[in-house]
Amino acid sequence: MSGGWPGGQACLPAAQMALDLVNNRTDILPDHELELIYHDSMCDPGEATKLLYDLLYTEPIKIVLMPGCSSVSTLVAEAARMWNLIVFSYGSSSPALSNRQRFPTFFRTHPSATLHNPTRVRLFQKWGWTKIATIQQTTEVFTSTLDDLEERVKEAGIEISVRQSFLTDPAVAVKNLKRQDARIIVGLFYETEARKVFCEVFKEKLYGKKYVWFLIGWYADNWFKIKDPAINCTVENMTEAVEGHVTTEIVMLNPETVRGASNLTSQEFLAQLMSRLGGKNPEETGGFQEAPLAYDAVWALALALNKTVAPLRAKGWTLEDFNYNNKEITAEIYRALNTSSFEGVSGHVVFDAQGSRMAWTLIEQLQGGSYKKIGYYDSTKGNLSWYGNDKWIGLGPPADQTKVIEEFRYLSQKLFVSVSVFAGLGILLGIVCLSFNIYNSSVRYIQNSQPYLNNMTAVGCVLALAAVFPLGIDGLHVHRSQFPVVCQFRLWLLGLGFSLAYGSMFTKIWWVHTVFTKKDEKKEKRKHLEPWKLYVTVAVLLAIDVLSLLIWQIMDPLHITVEKFTKEAPKEDLDVLIQPLLEHCSSEKMNTWLGVVYGYKGLLLLLGIFLAYETKSISTEKINDHRAVGMAIYNVAVLCMITAPVTMILSSQQDASFAFASLAIIFSVYITLVVLFVPKIRRLITRGEWQSEQQDTLKTGSSNNNDEEKSRQLERENRELQKIIQEKEERVTELRNQLAERQALRSRRRPSVQNQNQNHSVPSSQAEPPSYSPATDKRSLPASFSNSSNLYQGEGKLSRNNCHNSRLPLLYK
């Protein structure tokens, strides 16, 4: 029987050793002798194709083909099924070869490259990493390995955040890893490309205590010290860059002293192999690491063929009956290989359903320029044997990414306490003002200021100041689950406080404007103030606010939202970033609701300013403090119109936003209370008007009614005098016209006639009006008509009874 052998240096002597031992054993194929026919394909698929056809079409018939490289195995295994040949590889690691539909008769003692992946995933889990990056050379074996790794890490809940690849130049790929903050990096490339990669790693400083590299373990031990003209980094640069990296390597030599099927231990096998190599340096001998696999491959094949003897004899066949059309013998060999299980020099030999070898994985770490074994992993049992000698540049394994620490921003407690003190004093002032107004409600002066409306103003101010406290409460004081309740308190206290305080002042100024800017006949009808109408107006304003707030809270209730800011690096040299967070009260359509509320309140504020300006010169005893109300409205409107947009802009700055909003509330309330109530308190104290309603009535009697009657009488006299002045002005205009006609007549007379007329008396038809004096300027007007302002007083003066009655008859002369 014969076997084809395309390739190998150290593997060929190892296979020949196994073949010699098999042929010398009487318990294995005693009636058969195995023959090894070998050729070196140099891992070239084209050359392998030529050798394959030479082997197939030359005697003797081959029963199994044993390629080495993955590229050659792919070609041979895909074609071999056409000749019903078993393909058995000792050095192919490509994951693509595990495809049973494409390679139905393929087996290998070299584990698949994907066998590294369970070990890598186990290490990721051991060190607590959930985010990795990969960089690969663009070849089929590495692409397939990476696809398998991606599936495995996904099942383990690990994310591949960055995936880079390159063909020949890895510079751009390494820069991308650096830019995307890759920390745990799996590298899949051949040894020559590994030197290129780590030269770029050194240039980009992608190494050190923050980074861990995972590489393939079948490189030469001094691969990074080999001079390579393709890179421009020194050996020192490369040694510095590769320090601390971790490798995973399939265990190709049994670490235990166990005699297997060949009756050799792994160390005895190495000694015999070295003698066959003639003392060659193992590091310079190709395939030296895979030699135990080649040795065990021959033994696996021999044991499998030995298994087929009895089943074939039962069917009347022998192995010598095999030909390229005999599927039954091929099927028996397949079954025998598929159930193989023995101890070899490379470890326990067993195959999975895809024909791939199941083996242990060796884990090593480069420490101080040399590789140290730090553990083994048995993927079949999921058992990790750990030595505990792993060494790190920092305090321990680095983080898989820059650790982000979430840190909530809270309001400055000094600011909160300071503002709360002022708010508390304001509440105390409001209570004092309210108590004063209630206690002195029977005083006439207080009664004329509509004390119930002032009481509403004081209550509204207290509620607005009370809203300062929930404005300053955040996650530092209450649990997140309770924060929406704080949001509700903010909204309702501010809304109700504004409605009561501003609504009562607005009602006063509205009534004054309505009464004193109407026509006279309508004004008389509305002179009598009906307080219930004022209270209804305030109630309407309050009901609008309550209704709008209820609709808001039912349809789109307030809840807590968290705003994230740009990450910040701490001052210390730590591999962490601070993620500032800020809690807000918000709703799904917050901007819409704020637009409605601000629009309605803004219109009220603007209208209040207008009414206060229009009524600034009006005086009435029914509401004797409306000027103070107007001043308070000015201040409240200005502060509110500035505060609302500014707080929206400063919402991301908790201290500035709180300070601006709370101080605006405090100043508005203080100004309102001081302007409305302090003058009343001062008047009652300085004038001693602390009398009760009964005392005030006894002392004043009906003085208030008399004053009103006098006021109405003066207004009637004023209207009569205005009519008289209008009549006299018409008379003056007529007389001026007559004077103008006479002067025009004189100017047409001749001088001589004028002299004669001077010696005679003037006819009665041309007589000068009374008070005309010849001694005066003949062309000047009489003194009584020269200035009408001397005869008549203006409307304003007549209204004050300054018209002299003695001058009125002169207008009729």
Image: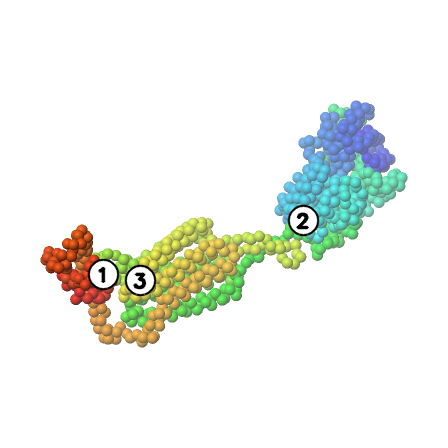
**Image point 81% across, 31% down: which residue?**
40
Counting from the top left corner in percent of width and height, residue 572 is at: 65, 58
Name the secondary structure under disc 1: loop
Kindly report which numbered mark, 3 or 2, lies closer to the viewer in this rendering: 3
Q: Nearer the viewer, residue 504 or 405?
A: 504
Q: Nearer the viewer, mark 1 or mark 2?
A: 1
Its colouring scheme is rainbow
Say if 590 sits above or below 508 in the image: above
Disc 3 + disc 1, Cβ < 8 Å:
no
* Secondary structure type for disc 3: loop
Whether 356 is drawn above or below 422: the answer is above
Left or right side of 207 for 493: left
Q: Give the quarter of the figure containing the C terminus.
A: bottom left
Q: Residue at x 65, y 46 (%)?
A: 179
Location of mark 2 (residue): 183
Viewer-nearest of labels 3 and 1? 1
User: Which of the image's four quarters has the N terminus?
Assistant: top right
Identify residue for label 1: 787
Q: Amino acid at mark 3?
A: Ser
Examine the rendered structure and indicate whether residue 796 appears above or below residue 47. below
How many marks overall? 3
Alpha carbon distance from label 1 to label 2: 103 Å
Q: Is residue 597 visible?
A: no
